[in-house]
Amino acid sequence: MCGRFLLDTDIEEIARTYGVYKREIKEFDRGDVYPTKDVPILVENNDRTIILANWGFPYINKKGVVINARAETIMEKPMFKDSFYNGRCIIPANLFYEWKDEGDKKKIRHKISLQSNPLMSLAGIYKITIDENSNERLMFVIITTEANENMKSIHSRMPLIIKDDMVGVWLKKNTPTEELKKILKRNMDDSLIIERCEDRDYQQLSMF
């Protein structure tokens, strides 16, 4: 799964990295990102746009939110199907966190980043929901897939990371379904940096 990531890059740099000319936000709360927090995502309608969205799809008639969608079933699940075909997005991140189970109820936090790029493109889907005050809210989930060889020693799942040359293909509305299926099965190879975090950092993050 993916339940926490870091985005500490300003909007100007994100825009330059992804070739974005249209921005609906100028700044955001940089740092660690948790479920239900607002964060910049990239969408592509007429133009590629940076927009602020909230992490998590709400359950129907239940409390809480769903933060991840499995790549293997996203095209069939009622909660995700329409967004997959009509609302694909990219979630920029500097790194994501995962916790390795080391037994005796002990889990150690690791941070995972790319060797080749300070920003990674996490695959996601988004939709517009209506809150209790009848206001529209843009919400997203992160797509996860089976862990690659690098990650298997840490966790069985990881975010689907879109390679640079596939970002446009992923975002475009008219991308053929067969091409999207290929992307869902193609995750980042062994070009990941995996670092064990100090206990002090882990304790600080655990307070939230």
Image (spheres, rainbow, N blue to C red):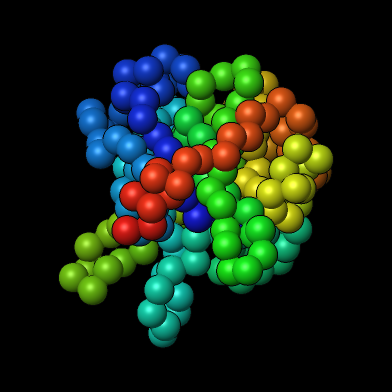
Q: Quadrant of the C terminus?
A: bottom left
Q: Which residue is at the front of the view, 25 or 177?
A: 25
The answer to whether residue 138 is visible is no
Res. 78 image quadrant: bottom right
Q: Quadrant of the N terminus?
A: bottom right
The x and y percentages for residue 148 are 78, 42
Residue drawn at x 41%, y 84% is: 61
Residue drawn at x 71%, y 26% is: 191
The x and y percentages for residue 155 are 69, 53
Q: Is residue 57 above or below residue 177?
A: below
* Residue 148 as seen in the image, left or right of residue 162: right
Total marks placed: 0
Q: Which residue is at the front of the view, 183 or 153?
A: 153
Q: Which residue is at the front of the view, 8 or 13?
A: 8
Q: Which residue is at the front of the view, 155 or 12?
A: 155
> Residue furthest toward the left?
133
Q: Is residue 79 above or below residue 90?
A: below
* Residue 47 as seen in the image, left or right of residue 178: left
The x and y percentages for residue 146 are 76, 51
Q: Is residue 49 above or below residue 19?
A: below
Res. 39 image quadrant: top left
* Residue 55 as seen in the image, left or right of residue 145: left
Res. 188 image quadrant: top right
The answer to whether residue 65 is visible is yes
The x and y percentages for residue 138 are 36, 53
